[in-house]
Image (tube, grey):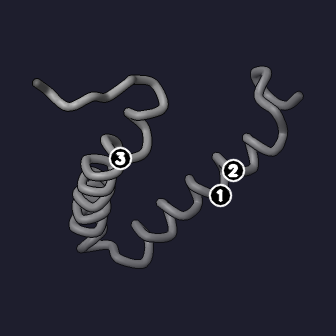
Amino acid sequence: MGIHGKPRWKIVGDTDASWGVFVIIHCARRWWWAIGAASAAGLTLLVTFAYPLLIAPIFNTLTPLE
């Protein structure tokens, strides 16, 4: 186990993601906020369309309304 009870591989993954964000902010100093907003919008669209198709059927029994 690593820091605060997290597995070591999880700490490495968190560190990689954090460095990725910092690299984007450093390389695009004036436009990092636009890149972040576009990424958040894209992720929102992806989750909006993927949830009913992939996640909801796992936890719910979906039937047509009568």
Q: Amino acid at mark 3?
A: Leu
Residue under the image location 79 percent in, 28 percent down: 3
Q: Position of residue 7 (x, y in %)?
A: 82, 33
- Residue 54, which numbered label? none
Residue 40 in the figure: left or right of residue 8? left
- Residue 53, which numbered label? 3
Q: Position of residue 61 (x, y in %)?
A: 38, 24
Residue at the outermost front position: 66
Q: Position of residue 13 (x, y in %)?
A: 69, 50
Distance of label 2 from label 3 (alpha carbons): 28 Å
Distance of label 1 from label 3 (alpha carbons): 30 Å
For disc 2, the marked residue is: 13
Q: Secondary structure at mark 3?
A: helix
Q: Earlier in the sequence, mark 1 or mark 3?
A: 1
Residue under the image location 24 percent in, 73 percent down: 31
Name the foreground residue: 14 vs 27.
14
Hey, which quadrant is residue 33 in on the image?
A: bottom left
Q: Secondary structure at mark 2?
A: helix
Give the vertical position of 47 relative to 26 (above or below).
above
Q: Position of residue 39 (x, y in %)?
A: 31, 62
Q: Is mark 2 in CB contact (under 8 Å) with mark 1?
A: yes
| Discs 1/3, front | 3
For disc 1, the marked residue is: 16
Q: Amino acid at mark 1?
A: Asp
